[in-house]
Amino acid sequence: MTANNMAADSTNESISAQTLTQFCDDYLSASAFKDYAPNGLQVDGGRPIQRIVTGVTACEALIDAAIADNADAIMVHHGYFWKGEPATLTGMKGRRVRKLMQHGISMIGYHLPLDAHPLSGNNAKLADVLDMKIIGALYPTESHPVGNIATCTPQSADALIATITQALGRSPLHIAAEYHADASAQTDARLIERVGICTGGAQDMIEQAAAMGCDAFISGEISERTTHSARELGVDYFACGHHATERGGIQALGEIVAQKFGLPVTFIDIENPA
């Protein structure tokens, strides 16, 4: 677990959960998205907010860290109440919500709006750390695209692997665009310049990346079928980790909130290899 404090530790300022949520709703254009979970305030802790913790996923370890930090609110990318999950507050879900309520901590979550934001979104921040420039949408008809196309200095797959490893602190799983039964026959002559990006679990967008003329596609996860898709479509695929590719957006949102309201905001990274 690592933490990064984005503002001074002491403050006499406070805001309501509703004020914080309204600002984030407006900044992320949350109402424009049809999502898999509610965006915004998911659990109202019922007290003024003076300290905020941010993290990728609202797991119990993050809640415990927020309690230890005396936080009044947690802001995350992966919150609660996903479509299709049981509605009852029992078991693991019940324990999490009970801890929030017992300690008066509000939970605020943003999913697709935090993927898509052109400046603070997960795709935008990933492109930044990989020294890429976003030039358009993976699906051109989307007004708030959750997938993007970026360009970079022409480079080999090995060079891009090195950049990803340094930026994210982990090596990606790479599926080469060309398959060779004899690994020794694999060459590294192909250069990558046009890259599709969609963080998290967007591996099936590789077909759209190919249709949009991308040399490579970067996401977080990989499925068995993704390997065959990459080879048959002629697109290098880089699975960089769901968690690792989605740290940037919530950190960026925390920085914006800290600047806007002058409150201490601490990013806490709960290690996750997936």
Image (spheres, rainbow, N blue to C red):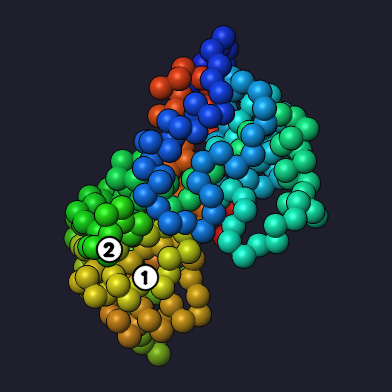
The amino acid beneath tag 1 is Met
Dot 2 and dot 1 residues touching (CB under 8 Å):
yes
Q: Tell me if residue 40 can be seen.
A: yes
Which residue occupies the foreground of this view, 137 or 21?
21
Which residue occupies the foreground of this view, 39 or 50?
39
Classify residue 274 by image quadrant.
bottom right
For the point 67% across and 47% down, the residue is 59
The amino acid beneath tag 2 is Leu
For the point 64% across and 26% down, the residue is 72
Asked if 231 appears above or below 153 in the picture, the reply is below
For the point 43% across and 77% down, the residue is 226
Classify residue 270 by image quadrant.
top right
| Residue assigned mark 2 | 138
Q: Quadrant of the N terminus?
A: top right
In the rendered image, residue 119, in percent from the top left (x then y), is placed at 31, 41
For the point 45% across and 20% down, the residue is 261
Which residue occupies the foreground of this view, 16 or 221?
16
Say what secondary structure mark 2 lies in: loop
In the rendered image, residue 2, in percent from the top left (x then y), is placed at 59, 37
Q: CA distance from mark 2 to mark 1?
A: 9 Å
Q: Residues within 10 Å of mark 2 (few under 14, many from 20)?
A: many
Q: Earlier in the sequence, mark 2 or mark 1?
A: 2
In the rendered image, residue 25, in percent from the top left (x then y), is placed at 43, 38
Q: Residue 205 got which mark? A: 1
Q: Residues within 10 Å of mark 1 (few under 14, many from 20)?
A: many
